[in-house]
Image (spheres, rainbow, N blue to C red):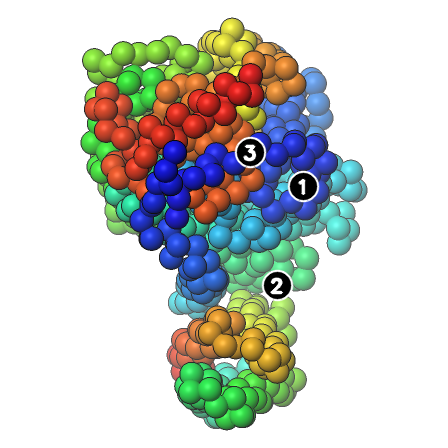
């Protein structure tokens, strides 16, 4: 019998196999944002219905140092974007430079967070204010730490020859994750520090 | 691309051992899911027998009251998180790749991890029977403040294990959902546009989208519950300024859509099976498919109907009542489409068809009591009574589990390669249908009379209906015997199945039974028409006659 030829579409369908990772990662981020949405709405609900929101002896949160941290974290979205642009132009040295800079900015943010935590007058058992404050900042901090780890992993991978010729989904995904972490922080900063 | 070498030479059977290991083949994982789910189904069923045994007399005489609390909590938890979700994920694993012509899932390793989490959190949940203080006793919804009590003060306690297990179940389901959605969106056969996709894939896509949106909220709520229970926070603790109703919002924001996660794939099963056994195209394919997504949208904004008596504002009650009733519209579209499919068809009353008809009957009944429950005044009257218990058992057992049995009998020949026995199957169907109605119908009059749920003793005036319900429950227990007998004996020595014993239309029926490991491999046929072309003579794929001829030849030479 003769070979029956099918449309070339099926070749493409299999060629796309590696593209699934990014699709899956974007779906994951959408899903992950619902956890934050749940925490944010819980925070807003508890805050608006509370009789005594702040624990006794706490005047409110100092917002100037966190604002500096915010600026650093949000700017790192810019540096990681630049890194991606350099990678697209095959300038690996500048890619690694800006990538490392973004990591350092993330690390600085975490350091600032730790310093802030250690100077606070309340713990996570201090009413719903303390609980939600540490839950939100802690859960977000965990994401920042994860982001830095992912970036480290991608940096190491960039030294494997040929690893980034074409398939750089890991870089794209990490960068997306980092933008996600930044956007979440902006909402968090508005909710916790600005809305007092 | 050619179909020159299709179908491939059958490989020697890789043996039993792969079912017990970390295997990344979706078809193996599917069977792992289903078998594991039925293992837990037997445990959950045994607990149900104890509950109905306790309730056959008005006095609390079979088990201790505290033990009874643990038993109904674990019954609900096991049946939902360890039976229904895993068994549906098993069907998804078997059906989605074969129906869309993909060689495997998009992320096979993630798929295997998602499965292996099931026995892990399952063991964790079962282990809670043996910790000091016994298992969780606050009901499957675990409302605070009951669920944040730890009277014995042990750090490892039943409630803590319960929350951990549920959170792990959420992680596993999210992994599964990511996989199913990506697979459906990115790996369909050439020519299979979204409007040529089988309805089961539509409903799976809808249900798994709900998982992705809803589950994170429950996981977030569960983390806060665990912190309240074990680390002294007061998110839900009124004495610390917390709000127990907040937990109810988190819980029902997921757990109401969870009902649609369960029933949508069953709608998919009905939509696949009615055309096959009526020999007619599915009536209103596109509307049936799109109605799934209307159910998703509405399903996300009805959760407060579980909280009408929890002190929510009147405007919220009214709003959520209206949204809840609106769901009857897309659901009605589906029910009438199935009736339109059956109407005037050449009905073949096989076991899967009988299960579908029984399931549809029960579903319509559950839909009517559902509308009653959505009505605020009725709901407040029957809240926390047996009326609610009867309603959701009609949905879950009467409709969803019967649909799942239909799917198992229908696709068993495809994935096992052997035919289940019709006689045992029909006996199973009869016992299930009669048992379920005998068990769950009396719960409605009981609820209207005012019998509260979750009690081990009751007023003697409720005795009659409780005895009937218990007898029905024991009949349901017995109904599992022909099922297990059928599955085990058919798997071992049932007659060999051809590639398409039901003369069904679909990509999965163009594969040998059981399908080779990578399904069509590189030779995926091009889809040229909509599914369910029964009686129209339209081929589903290019070169369909040639593919079928070769499959027939292969079967003839094997025989």
Label of residue B119 in the image: 1
Which chain is disc 1 placed on? B
Mark 2 — residue?
B233
Mark 3 — residue?
B9
Q: Earlier in the sequence, mark 2 or mark 1?
A: 1
Alpha carbon separation for disc pair 2 and 1: 31 Å
Which chain is disc 2 placed on? B
Q: Earlier in the sequence, mark 1 or mark 3?
A: 3
- The spot of residue B156 in percent (x, y) is 75, 50
Q: Do marks 3 and 2 share a subunit?
A: yes
Eyeballing the image, is B5 above or below B424?
Answer: below
What residue is rendered at 22% in x and 37% in y?
B287
Q: Secondary structure at mark 3?
A: loop
Q: Earlier in the sequence, mark 3 or mark 2?
A: 3
Can the viewer see residue B511?
yes
Q: Nearer the viewer, residue B304 or B299?
A: B299
């Amino acid at each position: 019998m003769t070979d029956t030829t099918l449309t070339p579409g099926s070749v493409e369908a299999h060629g796309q196999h590696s593209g699934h990772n990014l699709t899956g990662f974007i779906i994951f981020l959408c899903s992950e944002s619902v956890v934050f949405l749940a925490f944010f709405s819980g925070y807003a609900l508890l805050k608006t219905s509370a009789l005594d929101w702040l624990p006794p002896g706490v005047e409110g949160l100092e917002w100037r140092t966190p604002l500096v941290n915010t600026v650093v974290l949000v700017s790192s979205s810019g540096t990681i974007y630049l890194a991606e642009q350099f990678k697209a132009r095959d300038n690996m040295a500048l890619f690694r430079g800006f990538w490392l800079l973004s990591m350092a900015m993330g690390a600085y943010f975490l350091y600032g967070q730790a310093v802030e935590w250690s100077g606070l007058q309340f713990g996570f058992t201090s009413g719903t204010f303390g609980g939600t404050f540490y839950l939100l900042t802690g859960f977000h901090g965990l994401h920042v730490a994860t982001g830095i780890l992912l970036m480290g992993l991608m940096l190491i991978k960039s030294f494997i020859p040929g690893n980034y010729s074409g398939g750089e989904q890991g870089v794209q995904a990490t960068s997306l994750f980092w933008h996600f972490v930044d956007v979440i922080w902006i909402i968090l900063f508005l909710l916790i520090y600005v809305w007092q | 691309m050619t179909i020159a070498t299709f179908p491939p030479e059958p490989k020697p059977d890789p043996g039993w051992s792969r079912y017990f290991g970390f295997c990344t083949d979706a078809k193996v994982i599917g069977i792992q899911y289903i078998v594991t789910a039925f293992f837990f189904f037997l445990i959950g069923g045994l607990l149900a027998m104890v509950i109905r045994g306790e309730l056959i007399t008005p006095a609390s005489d079979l088990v201790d009251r505290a033990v009874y609390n643990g038993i109904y909590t674990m019954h609900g938890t096991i049946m939902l998180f360890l039976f229904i979700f895993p068994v549906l994920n098993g069907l998804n694993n078997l059906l989605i790749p074969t129906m869309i012509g993909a060689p495997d899932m998009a992320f096979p390793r993630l798929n295997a991890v998602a499965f292996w989490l099931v026995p892990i959190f399952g063991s964790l949940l079962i282990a809670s029977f043996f910790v000091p203080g016994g298992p969780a006793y606050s009901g499957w919804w675990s409302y605070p403040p009951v669920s944040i009590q730890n009277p014995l003060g042990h750090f490892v306690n039943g409630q803590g294990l319960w929350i951990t297990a549920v959170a792990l179940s959420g992680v596993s389901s999210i992994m599964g959902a990511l996989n199913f959605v990506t697979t459906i969106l990115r790996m369909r056969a050439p020519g299979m546009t979204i409007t040529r996709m089988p309805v089961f894939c539509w409903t799976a896509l809808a249900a798994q989208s709900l998982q992705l949106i809803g589950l994170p909220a429950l996981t977030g709520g569960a983390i806060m519950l665990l912190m309240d229970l074990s680390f002294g926070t007061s998110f839900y603790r009124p004495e610390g300024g917390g709000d127990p109703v907040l937990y109810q919002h988190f819980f029902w924001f997921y757990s109401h859509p969870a009902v649609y996660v369960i029933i949508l794939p069953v709608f998919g099963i009905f939509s696949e099976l009615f055309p096959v056994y009526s020999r007619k195209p599915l009536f209103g394919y596109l509307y049936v498919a799109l109605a799934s997504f209307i159910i998703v949208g509405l399903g996300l904004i009805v959760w407060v109907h579980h909280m009408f008596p929890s002190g929510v504002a009147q405007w919220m009650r009214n709003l959520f009542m209206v949204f809840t009733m609106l769901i009857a519209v897309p659901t009605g579209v589906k029910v009438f489409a199935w009736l339109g499919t059956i109407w005037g068809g050449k009905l073949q009353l096989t076991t899967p068809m009988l299960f579908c008809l029984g399931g549809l009957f029960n579903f319509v009944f559950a839909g009517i009591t559902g509308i009653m429950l959505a009505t605020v005044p009725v709901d407040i009257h029957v809240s926390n009574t047996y009326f609610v218990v009867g309603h959701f058992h009609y949905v879950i057992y009467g409709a969803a589990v019967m649909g799942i049995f239909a799917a198992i009998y229908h696709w068993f020949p495809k994935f096992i390669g052997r035919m289940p026995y019709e006689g045992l199957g029909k006996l199973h169907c009869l016992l299930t249908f009669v048992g379920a109605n005998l068990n769950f119908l009396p719960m409605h009059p009981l609820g209207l009379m005012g019998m509260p749920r979750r009690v081990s003793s009751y007023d003697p005036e409720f005795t009659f209906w409780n005895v009937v319900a218990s007898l029905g429950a024991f009949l349901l227990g017995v109904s599992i015997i022909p099922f297990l007998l059928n599955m085990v004996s058919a798997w071992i020595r049932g007659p060999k199945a051809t590639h398409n014993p039901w003369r069904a239309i679909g990509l999965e029926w163009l594969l040998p039974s059981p399908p080779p490991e990578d399904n069509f491999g590189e030779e995926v046929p091009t889809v040229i028409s909509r599914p369910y072309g029964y009686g129209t003579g339209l081929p589903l794929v290019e070169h369909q006659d040639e593919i079928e001829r070769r499959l027939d030849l292969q079967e003839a030479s094997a025989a």
